[in-house]
Image: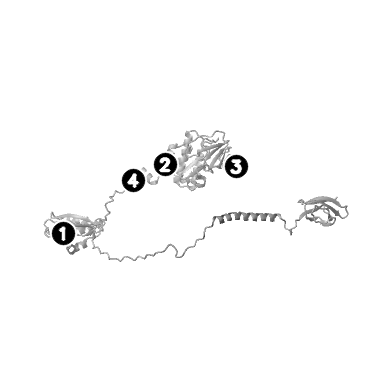
Amino acid sequence: MESLGHYLLRERIVLPGVGAMEAFEGQDVRTGIDVLAFRPIAKPLPELSIPHTLPWIDQEGDAWIAEIPVGAVKTAWLAGRLDIARLTQWCKQLVTVLHWAQERDIPVGYVIPELIWARGSRIWLGGVGVPNPEHARDFSGLLNTIKVFAGEAYPALPWREALEDYVAGHRDYTALLERLEFEGETPASKSSSSDPQAAVRTSPPAQDPSRPHADPLEARRARAGGEGVGDAVRGEGASSSLEARRARAGGEGVGDAVRGEGASSSLEARRARAGGEGVGDAVCGERAQDEMTPDKRPAKATSQDAPDAEKQTHSKSLNVEVNEPAQPAAASTPPRRIRIEERLEPPFEVLEPPLPSRRTVALWIWLIPLVLLLAGLGWWMRSRTPSPGATAVYPVEFRLQPPGPGASLAILEAPEGSQMPLNTEIAQLPGRVDFDRPGIYRIRVRVQGRAPVESLIEVPNPGGVTISLQ
């Protein structure tokens, strides 16, 4: 990793071409926001306001710093996994960026998937304003980027030829944008816009939502039932009166048949009841001489209209049904309710522990630190006092140069407190010799056939002692 001011450069982005321009993906250590850095650029930082481009926020020496939006991801990670609608939106945004930059004479030197970030259907192109010695605007990079995004689906893109013609200079920006917008629409909107007459021909006629849908066969059956009822009514003569009949949602067919009589009959009313009893038609003649009371009306109507009621059939259009007398609801016994009462308080007395007094609390506050202090002091004193059973040993390795016959070692002088014997051979060399005290020792080395040699050594001696034989 490399640092650039308060920016940490994490990953290098490989740019096409042979120029000295470098691009890095990094992070602002102060805010944690991801950034994009380009260097070396000797020009001052430009102030650009082009949509779908990363904004420049800072300049560190010869490096330009752009801010990456929060939540945006690299489009290189999504290559080959995009649908045509999303790819069309991205292509339109990239073409718009290049067109705006061309109108304002702003260089767009690099267009590669590694410099494009996306969040949803919106993308941002980084490096707008960075020059490239090979070209001012990277139209070929635009085409290669779309090929990478599309993957194996690139040959089947509906606007592939239009994009290639635009990159080659055979099609202008407006024609390409119209083609992209047309392909970005939904299939229903494209078909309606291309052939409006076909849409009018294929559209079904408007239907009144208040009229129910009627089946032709059921309508004919209902009309036949209504005619039979009308014939029975006309046979009674002008002096008789037609009594009210109860029916559910189907009195319209009966009323239409009764209206076919002469001036002696008239439709009085249709009454709707909330309990679903239907609509009843009451037709009274002008010369009716006797009327029936409400108590006798159900019996007579039942005896006279039974054959007619059998002719009526259920129809979706006329909605004719036979009215059945409502059965009286049986008186039901209300269910028994069991109420369980439970006391919230226990039946025994609750004994709560007494609250500690202030004196007890203060005693514990002083006692706990005192115990910890005494424990620490005892551990420190124990660590400083050496154990009597353990004896310190300071080993020293003795070597002979050149190796040959063995030698003996005797101590002539030892430091104060040493318990090692003096003027006595204590070890055979070469080998390891253990001393009991650190300090300066005066030793004598005797080799068979040679004069004894005396020397001073310091203990401890990690490197050991080498005795040269001459």
Disc 4 versus disc 3: nearer the observer: 3
Q: Which residue is mark 1?
A: 242
Figure quadrant of residue 182: top left
Disc 3 versus disc 2: nearer the observer: 3
Disc 1 versus disc 2: nearer the observer: 1
Q: Residues within 10 Å of mark 3 (few under 14, many from 20)?
A: few
Estimate the x, y position of residue 173 in percent, counting from the top left: 44, 37
Figure quadrant of residue 252: bottom left
Q: For the residues marked 4 and 3, what is the alpha-carbon distance in whole angstroms?
A: 63 Å
Callout 3 secondary element: strand
Amino acid tagged 2: Glu
Amino acid tagged 1: Leu
Q: Which residue is mark 2?
A: 181
Report whether 13 appears left or right of 286. right
Amino acid tagged 3: Glu
Mark closer to the chain start, 2 or 4: 2
Amino acid tagged 4: Ala
Query: Which residue occupies the foreground of this view, 203 or 155?
Result: 203
Query: Which residue occupies the foreground of this view, 24 or 150?
Result: 24
Q: Residues within 10 Å of mark 4 (few under 14, many from 20)?
A: few
Q: Which residue is mark 4?
A: 199
Mark closer to the chain start, 1 or 2: 2
- The residue that appears at 69% across and 55% down in the rendered structure is 381
Q: In the rendering, which numbered label is found on residue 2?
A: 3
Mark closer to the chain start, 4 or 1: 4
